[in-house]
Image (spheres, helix red, strand yellow):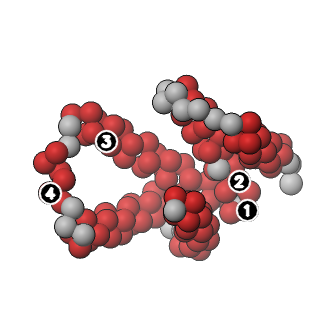
Amino acid sequence: MWKYYALASALMAALTAIFAKIGIKNIDSNLAVALRTCVIVVMMWCIVFAFDTASGIKSLTRTNWIFLVLSGITTGLAWLFYFKALAVGDVSRVMPIDKLSIVFTFILSVIILKEPFSWKVLLGVSLIAGGALIIILDRG
């Protein structure tokens, strides 16, 4: 089932890039990120209340809080950099480079989380890295 969620996430990320590129036309990218974030906050709290999961807040540990806050900060920074890149670059060039996050995540998951990996995963991550490198080095 996780593969279907991952594919749905990829499709939503693709639509996000297209919608964002259209939406940031003639506005500051920081303002765009702030507006997008407000929409996400409202949407997520609606989902939390709709599924009656807000009571889970009571069971959060200090570690949960620390790492969720850190995750929120890094997400916000990622969005700021992403929207700056979209504001000045082509979506078709920004997205593959942005997907180097997959490569970085793979490396960090092996180092920090000690996750195992197969040669197939390593090959796939290497292909992503190679594709992004080709786009970075393209002077077009």
Residue 14 found in image quarter: bottom right
Closer to the camera: disc 4 or disc 1?
4
Check if mark 2's residue and mark 1's residue have beta carbons within 8 Å. Answer: yes
Q: Disc 4 designates what residue?
A: 55
Residue 42 found in image quarter: bottom left
Closer to the camera: disc 3 or disc 4?
4
Closer to the camera: disc 4 or disc 2?
4
Q: Disc 3 designates what residue?
A: 69
The Cα–Cα distance between marks 4 and 1, rounded to whole angstroms, is: 42 Å
Q: Is mark 1 on a helix, strand or loop?
A: helix
The Cα–Cα distance between marks 4 and 2, rounded to whole angstroms, is: 39 Å
The Cα–Cα distance between marks 2 and 3, rounded to whole angstroms, is: 27 Å
Tell me the crowding category of disc 2: few under 14, some 14 to 19, or many 20 or more residues within 10 angstroms, Cα based. Answer: some
Check if mark 2's residue and mark 3's residue have beta carbons within 8 Å. Answer: no
Q: Name the residue at 86% across, 48% down.
A: 139
Q: Name the residue at 74% across, 36% down.
A: 119
